[in-house]
Every structure is written in structure tokens, then in C-alpha cells.
Image (tube, helix red, strand yellow):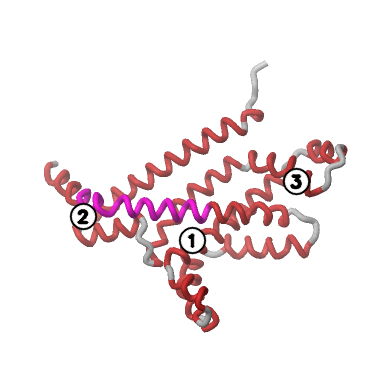
Amino acid sequence: MLDIVQQFGRAFLYWDGQGLSGLAVTLWLLVASIAIGFVGAVPLAVARVSKRRWLSTPVRLYTYVFRGTPLYVQLLLIYTGLYSLEFIRSHVWLDAFFRSGFHCAVLAFALNTCAYTTEIFAGAIRSTSHGEVEAARAYGMSPFTMYRRIVLPSALRRALPLYSNEVILMLHATTVAFTATVPDILKVARDANSATYQSFNAFGLAALLYLAVSFALVALFRRAERRWLAYLAVRPH
């Protein structure tokens, strides 16, 4: 028992100096990719449900490709594949962007979560009550106003439970960022394992950090659901 405590102590001492920076990098990856993905998914979801094929078909193709290929492969294509192109290296700002592993990871994660979020929001838009749409039209709202004031607010609230799952899955997906040499939690855990040779302790501490962040996100989304989905709760007669 004492030996186990000592082993955890050695691993913890390593984490004490590197763990917070790894946690900060992971949270930055998550927040940046989720924010970009959310902003892109809202208009793409509207285009996805459009009856105009020239709008819906490109979005459907995009979501099909990014949901049908592994995130790990997408990250490798963006981090190593694109930088091998002469077009990328010949432009200063493109060269600077794709030279950074962090930038490539955020781009890959944002494109991936945007594809999944687009389908989540599109499904919520399709399930909007026909009565709400008819009432908006009866008030003389234009399609843009109807989406802005009626359809999107209602759809985004109803999509919250599914979207919370996507955010948690995106947190777990950030573990592939070490491929692009990004010093996230898993990268710190791998370095701790190499320094201490205590694999269970090093990766166990990483698992506890991911678990703590996941619990915090779940609690945050549950609170949001209770506030914004209260009107859907079944009230006793």
C-alpha cells in the first residue's frame, strides 16, 4: 500500500508542474472548437433543411464526409497533409497558420464538431411544431424573421440535450491533439509516464482530470436544460 502511495506521489509531483498547463490547453481546444463549430452550424443547419438543392446538397456532402471519417485522420490530413502542398507553403499567413499544431487541431476539431452539430440543429429545426410556423406566417413574418424569432430559438432549446452529448464527446476527442504535438492533458500524461515509468498513475491522473471536466460540463448543461426546457416539463394536474 505504501508503495502505491509513493508511486502516485511521484506521478503527482510531475503533474503538479505540468498538469495545469495541460488542462488549460485542453480547455482552450474545447472552447475554441465548440465556439467556431456552433457559429458555423447554425447557418449550415438552416441551409441543410432548405428545399433548394443548391443550398442543402453541399452541406449534406460536408456533414457526410466529416461524420464518415475518423477525427484522427482529419487531424493528420490538416496538420501534415495540407502543409505538404506548395500552395500552403508559398503563402506567408497560410504557412504560419498550418505550421502551428494548435491551430491545426482547432481547425480539425471545429470542422468535425460543426458537421455533427449541423445535423443536430437541422433535426431540431425539422421537428419544429407546424403550429409555430403557421402562427409566425399569420403574423406576416418574413422567412428571415421567422427563423430568427421563432424557429431557431425553439430548435436550439430542444437540441440542448443532444448538443450537450456532442460537447462531452468533443472533450474526449481532444485526446488526439497530441498527434499535432499540442501539450494537452494526454500529452502531459504521456510525458509523466516517460519520466516516472508509472503508467497507471500517470494516465489515471489524466482520467481524473477528464472526469472532473466532464462532470462540470454535465452539471452546466443540466442547469441550462432546467432553465430553457422548463416549458416542456410535464406538470401534474
- Give whichever of discs 3 and 2 has the lower sequence position: 3
Report whether 24 appears left or right of 117.
Answer: left
Query: What are the residue bounds of the magenta stretch?
Result: 11-34
Looking at the image, residue 149 lies above or below residue 181:
above
Residue 200 visible in the picture? no
Q: In front: 80, or 66?
A: 80
Residue that appears at 70% across and 65% down: 58
From the image, which quarter does the C terminus lie in? top right
Report whether 200 appears left or right of 112.
Answer: left
**Which amino acid is tagged 3?**
Tyr
Where is residue 184? Give x, y as percent.
Answer: 36, 57
Q: In front: 3, or 188?
A: 188
Q: CA distance from mark 2 to mark 1?
A: 30 Å
For label 3, the crowd category at 10 Å Cα-Cα, with few meaning under 14, some 14 to 19 and many 20 or more, is some
Disc 2 is placed on an element classified as loop
In this figure, which residue is indicated by the disc labeled 3? 147
Q: Is residue 19 magenta?
A: yes
Residue 163 visible in the picture? yes
Residue that appears at 41% across and 61% down: 177
Label drawn at residue 106: 1
